[in-house]
Image (cartoon, rainbow, N blue to C red):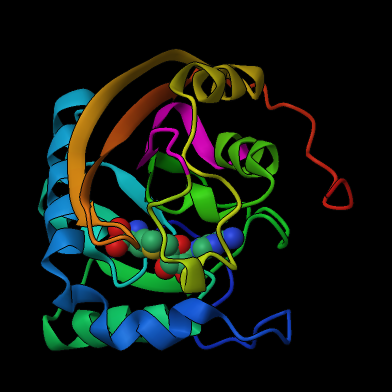
Amino acid sequence: MNHPAEEPQEANAPMNHAKINPFDETAAQWDAEPRRVDLARAVGQAILRHARPTPDMNVLDYGCGTGLLGRFLLPHVQNVTGADSSPGMLQVLEDKIRSDNLRHMRATRLDLEHDPVPETRYHLIVANMVLHHVRRIDVLLAAFHRMTLPGGMVALADLDAEPGTFHRPDTKENVFHHGFDRREFMDCLRQVGFVEVSDATAHVIRKPIATGEVREFPVFLIVGRCAGDERPPRPGHDQR
Ligand SMILES: C[S@@+](CC[C@H](N)C(=O)[O-])C[C@H]1O[C@@H](n2cnc3c(N)ncnc32)[C@H](O)[C@@H]1O
């Protein structure tokens, strides 16, 4: 297997924080919801169109969950590392890797909002629907920039700004953003050092909200390139 050296902490390593991760509880049933599978496929197709990954690339799928997006991209790249803060999600991915003999995919525990930034660099970092669960987006994007090889790319998918109806009231505990304004988000990417930043609509999620009405929630894909060798100052993890 041709994975980059100096990988972050392994999937079954103990969590830094004692708090229960709510994603652990949904992990086993995550893929049973067709809406999630459809979204990952649509985002994967948008990444093929807009980031144009190649077979020599090492890819990080950050906030990978059960690995739906990374699994879609796997045939198009050299290898995929799925990273997530939920041991439950990572266990489901580990099981898939074993049962489907995915020799070029691996799972690892990582929370870039709280953990030190690993030394590993990637040609492409992708993330689907994790950003709204991260309080300090500036810390996360700066970490992505440090982890992207010069000339490499990020391709990040999440909800456009929404009125706070996407998540059920009982699942809002770990939701820190009601989607994102694309222009502001693209400016954040430029501020940490990405260039050639562009956006597209990858998908529109149709789902019932708490009242029972079905609403549409557009999902953007924002792509940026890491210009050169220079790295921005490492964000202080005590800035939160
Ligand atoms: C809505 S799910 C999306 C999962 C997957 N990307 C998909 O498309 O099916 C969000 C994922 O982000 C993970 N997550 C939330 N906060 C995180 C953080 N700070 N660092 C890493 N992963 C995080 C959760 O554990 C969960 O697996």
Q: Based on the displayed image, in which of its 4 quarters is residue 192 positioned?
A: top right
Q: Main secondary structure of the magenta part?
A: strand
Residue under the image location 63 percent in, 41 percent down: 137
Residue 160 part of the magenta segment: yes
Question: Please, is residue 160 above or below residue 224 in the view?
Answer: below
Residue under the image location 49 percent in, 83 percent down: 87
Question: Please, is residue 3 above or below residue 225 in the view?
Answer: below
Q: What is the x, y in percent for residue 68?
A: 22, 63
Q: Nearer the viewer, residue 50 or 6?
A: 50
Horizontal side, residue 183 vs residue 39: left or right: right
- Does residue 201 show up? yes
Q: Based on the displayed image, in which of its 4 quarters is residue 139 positioned?
A: top right
Q: Quadrant of ligand 1?
A: bottom left
Residue that extends furthest to the top in the rendered view of this protein? 196
Q: What is the x, y in percent for residue 100?
A: 11, 81
Horizontal side, residue 96 vs residue 139: left or right: left
First to last magenta residue range = 146-163
Residue that extends furthest to the front in the rendered view of this protein? 211
- Does residue 2 show up? no
The quarter of the rendered structure image containing the N terminus is: bottom left
Q: What is the x, y in percent for residue 54?
A: 18, 35
Q: Nearer the viewer, residue 207 or 27?
A: 207
Residue under the image location 22 percent in, 54 percent down: 213
Residue 199 part of the magenta segment: no
Horizontal side, residue 35 vs residue 157: left or right: left
Q: What is the x, y in percent for residue 223?
A: 36, 26
Q: How many marks?
A: 0
Residue under the image location 30 percent in, 57 percent down: 209
Question: Please, is residue 35 above or below residue 49 in the view?
Answer: below
